[in-house]
Image: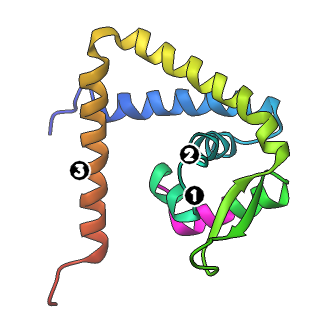
Amino acid sequence: MQRMERSIGIAIKKANNALSRDSDHFAKKLGLTGMQISTINFIAAHETTQDIFQRDLEHEFNIRKATASSLVTTMVAKDLLIRVPATNDARYKRLLLTPNARQLATKIEAFFETSERRIQNLLGPAFESTYTQLTQISTDFTAKATEQKSGPKGD
């Protein structure tokens, strides 16, 4: 089997690692992790228009339930999030930013906006098609992994 000289999968992995390291470096200055600043940014961007629950974090960041649970528990302990019963069903807990996290949210948003601009500038006119194709890869591979996990039907 011939080895691929230019693997798009490896290029995506390297780009993701570089973005993660950049995010982690910024987060460390705030005493947080890259995932924590991403969570603060996501909640800050959506909390005025919708209730945010742990399952929303699972979906947005493509993380497992246990990972999301651990993330939320840690962020509650660090006074970044609070859990509040949902108005229509107290079994579900909405996630809200604490005043502490809200203070950080503006800096975090500016960081992510700058990163996004850098990416858009690097991609130039290819931005839209690259975004569409990467989204397609994510959707397709996530669906395939879900199929494989559930196994064949009727065995």
Q: Tell me residue 34's x, y (percent).
A: 66, 39
> Amino acid type of disc 1?
Ile
> Amino acid type of disc 2?
His
> Amino acid type of disc 3?
Asp
Q: Which residue is label 3 attached to?
A: 140
Look at 30% across and 35% down and name the residue there.
134
Look at 43% across and 9% down and name the residue there.
121
Q: In this view, does 92 lie to the left or right of 61?
A: right
Position of the N terminus, as image quadrant, is top left
Q: How far apart are marks 1 and 2 (CA)?
A: 7 Å
- Magenta region includes residue 55: no
Q: Which residue is label 1 attached to?
A: 52
Q: Tell me residue 105's x, y (percent).
A: 72, 35
72 relative to 17, above or below: below
Q: Which residue is label 2 attached to?
A: 46
Look at 16% across and 83% down and name the residue there.
153
